[in-house]
Image (cartoon, grey):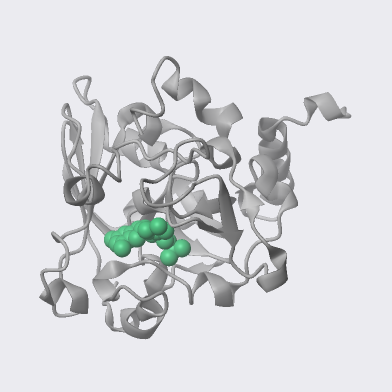
Amino acid sequence: MKLSWSDVTPEALFLNRRAFIAGLGVAAAAPALAAAEEPNSFEQITNYNNFYEFGFGKTDPADNAGALTTDPWAVEIGGLVDRPGSYSVADLAPGNAVEERIYRLRCVEAWSMVIPWLGVPLASVLNKVGVQSGAKFVAFETLYRPDEMPEQRRNSMDWPYREGLRLDEAMHPLTILATGLYGKPMPNQNGAPIRLVVPWKYGFKSIKSIVKITLTDRQPVTTWQAMQPREYGFYANVNPTVDHPRWSQATERRIGAGLLGGRQETLMFNGYGDQVAQLYAGMDLARDY
Ligand SMILES: Nc1nc2c(c(=O)[nH]1)N[C@H]1C(S)=C(S)[C@@H](COP(=O)(O)O)O[C@H]1N2
Ligand SMILES: [Mo]
């Protein structure tokens, strides 16, 4: 089939790339504009991180996360599911199901990267455990292990780190549980051995080193919402028209673009609007931030 330009929707790119790489043994996807954007280097992706359990500096995770024991690892899945229990990473993301997804990551602090993740759709995991009809939200928790996570020995935040999604956001095909990047197992500083990636939301929603997933009928309380409700909402969709109370969200600094690279415009839903905007039809995106 020959594509004309009007056919080259993000979805067409997504399906094409997937079909193309599937022939090489790894199913891949490159939704939206990320297809045309150069991924950041492995060096950049693994040395400029937010993972506050290991400190608040951008190089603290690279310096301190090496001490984290990621094997064995268990993810407790419970709440409104048919098959609750303790699952291994291989149970949730078996090697033959892992795909590459090249996504932009836009931090609420107004910097961004392009990252080639490896992972599985979160939907595949939720279908495996069987979501019950009363479930409306998915809550996630990071490991609490102060012995290995130095910042958890201080009261700087209310540990463990918590996040949540509405069930339809969690089931959306762009939402993945990632187990690696650049074709390698997930580096500890990026959230080994398994972390969430929700590319149309600010980076803080993409919770790292997950040990607990709970299906619930109530909107979960998230770490940032609880700490700073005026600054961080539950939805946290990337939105250049809604500023953070302390800075503009209109533009972003692409890591590695260099001092002369300047800033680039931030895209609504981080550029994934064609795929996700319908999830928020009728909502006031300034209020329901
Ligand atoms: N458990 C946990 N998850 C977390 C964070 C954190 O501090 N702790 N930081 C978040 C923020 S603010 C961002 S921008 C992304 C950064 O992901 P990366 O370091 O892999 O680029 O992880 C998110 N997930
Ligand atoms: Mo972030």
Q: Give left or right: position of 23 versus 199.
A: right
The answer to which of 86 and 186 lies nearer the viewer is 186
Q: Give left or right: position of 91 versus 139.
A: right
Q: Residue furthest top?
A: 282
The answer to which of 78 and 33 lies nearer the viewer is 33
- Identified at 34% across, 33% down, the residue is 127
Give percent across and percent down for residue 115.
57, 59
Q: Give left or right: position of 180 versus 288.
A: right
Give percent across and percent down for residue 286.
39, 29
In this figure, what is the number of numbered marks?
0
Q: Is residue 44 visible?
A: yes
Quadrant in which the C terminus appears: top left
Residue 282 falls in image quadrant: top left
Give percent across and percent down for residue 236.
37, 40
- Identified at 41% across, 27% down, the residue is 285
Q: Is residue 99 visible?
A: no
Q: Give left or right: position of 139 versus 93.
A: left
The answer to which of 235 and 195 lies nearer the viewer is 235
> Compared with residue 87, is residue 9 higher up or lower down, i.e. above or below?
above
> Compared with residue 200, is residue 194 higher up or lower down, i.e. above or below?
below
Quadrant in which the N terminus appears: top right
Give percent across and percent down for residue 280.
43, 23
Ligand 1 quadrant in view: bottom left
The answer to which of 47 and 71 lies nearer the viewer is 47
